[in-house]
Image: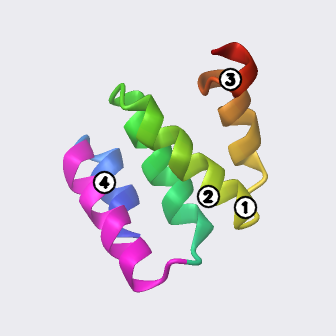
Amino acid sequence: NLGNLYCLSGDLPESISRYTKAIETAPNIGEAYYNRGLVLIYLKDKDKGCIDLSVAGELGIEDAYGVIKKYCKTEEDR
């Protein structure tokens, strides 16, 4: 996945762009939402990152729920 390669090379904006293109091409790929969500949270865009993680969880990426619990505020926390 090109998004992962750009992320590993430190080009986080380009990795987000590549994950977005993957999502546009195949919206049922939970890994793309999960990875984009992680990068967004790292870049301090928690709202968008948490939305992506939620979608990833709905698409079967179980690890997303642990990240959501750690980094995303729930309605109870607000």
Q: What residue is shown at x 66% (from left), y 34% (from top)?
A: 67
- What is the distance, in whole Å, between disc 2 and disc 1 at their CAs? 5 Å
Bin the neighbour count of mark 4 within 10 Å (Cα to Cα): few under 14, some 14-19, many 20 and up.
many
SS for callout 2:
helix
Foreground residue among 72 and 76? 76
Q: Which residue is mark 2?
A: 55
Q: Which residue is mark 3?
A: 70
Instruction: Check residue 23 in the rendering and tell me which mark sits there, or answer none.
Output: none
Q: Which residue is mark 4?
A: 16
Number of numbered discs:
4
At label 4, the amino acid type is Ile
At label 2, the amino acid type is Val
- What is the distance, in whole Å, between disc 3 and disc 4 at their CAs? 21 Å
Front tag of 1 and 4: 1
Q: Are marks 1 and 4 in contact (CB under 8 Å)?
A: no
How far across and how far down the image is residue 22, in percent?
Answer: 39, 75
> Measured along the vertical axis of the image, is residue 16 above or below residue 42?
below
Q: What residue is shown at x 53% (from left), y 46% (from top)?
A: 51
Front tag of 2 and 4: 2
How far across and how far down the image is residue 42, in percent?
Answer: 40, 29
SS for callout 1:
helix
Q: Are marks 2 and 1 in contact (CB under 8 Å)?
A: yes
